Image (cartoon, rainbow, N blue to C red):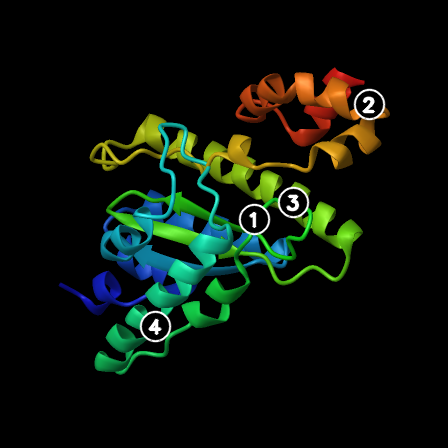
């Protein structure tokens, strides 16, 4: 077992872990560039790390996993402590500690940071965490940016999966934004509809997020 299998590392290590496939290395590089352009920080998680997290994360077939509510945040800090111990044992700088404390609660009125996990071929996962938002407007912008990141990542993974058999059954979908919960009132304000009207469309909003950008969803409700 390599230390990359045991220690959370910066996303820069992705190309090392996935150098078995040039296309996989390109995915990691592309996702890193996307994340950096959105002002997000990234870490690489192994399957072992995700087993720690999975007890508090809802994994779905579509996979846009939301990291965080109040209970998840408390759990994540425990995970952070454990991974820190592992990292110390390997004499490896522990970078995840910068991200986890600001992950939750996610997609609620009081949220100031966002997180998402992307499964990668070969057993790894990319974890992205947005820096703390300065205000509600900034937070809304970051939510939209994370949707763009998810869409870009999905497209990249889809392109690779169509040409590569190295996924070994790993579900290459991105974390499910449909559990979000985008504040209904905020959506209502954006599209000029009543709270109740948006609430009635909640399921269709969630269903369409897998296929459309949030702008498309808003346009469909307008």
Q: Height in image: 134 above or below 182?
A: below
Precedes in sequence: disc 1 or disc 4: 4
Residue with the mark numbered 3: 143
Q: Nearer the viewer, mark 2 or mark 4?
A: 2
x and y, in percent, of residue 43 in the image? 42, 61
Residue with the mark numbered 1: 106
Specify the quadrant that holds the C terminus. Answer: top right
Name the foreground residue: 1 vs 157. Answer: 1
- Tally of numbered discs: 4
Name the foreground residue: 205 vs 42. Answer: 205
The residue drawn where x is 38% and y is 45% is 57
Using the numbered discs, state the Cα–Cα distance from disc 3 to disc 1 in whole angstroms.
Answer: 10 Å
Answer with left or right where residue 7 lies relative to residue 80: left
Residue with the mark numbered 2: 194
Mark 1 vs 4: CB contact within 8 A: no
The residue drawn where x is 25% and y is 64% is 4
């Amino acid at each position: 077992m390599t230390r990359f299998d045991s220690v959370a590392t910066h996303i820069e290590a992705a190309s090392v872990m996935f150098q078995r496939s040039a296309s996989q290395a390109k995915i990691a590089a592309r996702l890193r560039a996307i994340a950096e352009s959105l002002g997000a920080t990234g870490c690489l998680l192994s399957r072992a790390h995700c087993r720690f997290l999975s007890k508090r994360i809802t994994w779905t077939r579509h996979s846009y996993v939301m990291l965080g509510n109040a209970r998840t945040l408390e759990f994540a800090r425990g995970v952070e402590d454990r991974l820190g111990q592992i990292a110390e044992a390997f004499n490896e700088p522990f970078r995840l500690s910068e991200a986890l404390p600001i992950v939750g609660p996610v997609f609620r009125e009081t949220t100031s940071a966002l997180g998402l996990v992307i499964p990668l071929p070969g057993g790894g996962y990319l974890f992205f965490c947005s820096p703390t938002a300065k205000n509600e407007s900034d937070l809304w912008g970051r939510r939209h940016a994370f949707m763009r990141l998810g869409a870009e990542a999905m497209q990249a993974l889809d392109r690779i999966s169509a040409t590569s058999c190295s996924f070994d059954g790993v579900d290459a979908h991105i974390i499910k934004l449909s559990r979000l919960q985008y504040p209904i009132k905020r959506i209502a304000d954006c599209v000029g509809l009543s709270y109740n009207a948006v609430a009635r469309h909640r399921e269709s909003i969630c269903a369409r997020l897998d296929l459309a950008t949030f702008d498309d969803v808003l346009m469909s409700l307008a």
